Structure formats: C-alpha cells, structure tokens
Amino acid sequence: MTGRAYYVYILGSRSRTLYTGVTGDLQRRLLQHKQSDSAGFTARYHVTRLVYYEIFGDPKAAIAREKEIKGWRRAKKVALIKAMNPKWLDLSGEWFRSGTRVRR
C-alpha cells in the first residue's frame, strides 16, 4: 500500500449512458470530464455525472477492478450504481464552484 488513493468511477449522462474509468485524482479527473477537456467519449455523449466510485490503496487493484466492471453487461453495472446511488445523483455535485479550472 502506497498511502495514496486510487479510484474506479462510473459516470452517467442524463440519458444514462455510462463511462467507467480509473484515476489517482478523482476530483481533478471529474473536473476534466465536466469541462470536456478532450474530444473523447464523455465529451461527445455529455457523460459528466459521478454516479459511482470505489477507493483503492493499490493502483493495480484499481486497474483490475476497472477492467472487471468494463467487462460486465450494462444491467450489472446499473445494479452496482443503484446499490450505492439509487437516484443516480451526481456524487460530485458539491465539489466544484462555477468557473473552476483544472491547474495544468
């Protein structure tokens, strides 16, 4: 254990399109998604709401979990989200103020 936290997270859109990712800095990564900093999947489909996350102390365990979840059928992912967040609320809703930018 390195003492650092690693996160596996699932983002959802209003239409409930899902995206699963892994990061060592969840707040920074979510801000990047919310600001659509890249022209990738989350920007294209407006997938910016944090609906689920898990915390790990080991990066290899986090990456393995991300791969496991990505291999699941949608119904199993939805059940995982509903167990933690039945209303599909944006769990990062209070983290950011209007106009916040990621430091480069």
Image (cartoon, grey):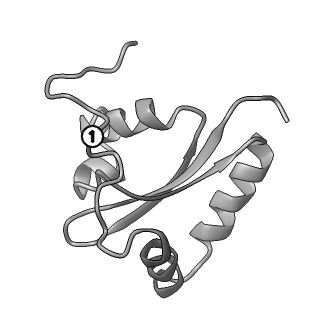
Name the residue located 27 percent from the left edge and 40 percent from the top edge.
94
Residue 57 in which image quadrant: top right
Which residue appears at 23% of the width and 22% of the height?
100
**Relative height, residue 9 to residue 13 (above, below):** above
In the figure, 86 relative to 7: above or below?
A: below
Give left or right: position of 95 versus 97: right
- Quadrant assignment for the C terminus: top left
Q: Position of residue 40 (x, y in %)?
A: 34, 46
| Residue, disc 1 | 94
**For this rendering, which residue is in front, 37 or 101?**
101
Residue 67, given in percent of the width and then of the height, sits at 66, 62
Rendered position, 65 above or below 87: above
Determine the residue located farthest toward the bottom in the rendered image: 75
What secondary structure is found at the residue carrying circle 1?
loop
Residue lying at 42% horizontally and 29% vertically, measured from the top left: 28
- Determine the residue positioned at 33% across, 34% down: 31
**Quadrant location of the N terminus?**
top right
Q: Is 46 placed left or right of 64 in the picture?
A: left
Q: Amino acid at mark 1?
A: Glu
How many labels, in total?
1
Quadrant in the picture for residue 30 = top left
**Is 1 rendered above or below residue 85?**
above
Find residue 93 and report its horizontal and vertical position in percent. Answer: 26, 46
Mark 1, residues whose alpha carbon is within 10 Å: few (<14), some, or many (≥20)? few
Q: Residue furthest right?
A: 1
In this view, which residue lies farthest toward the top?
104
Residue 58 point in image, percent of width and height: 78, 42
**Does 15 sit left or right of 81 as displayed?**
left
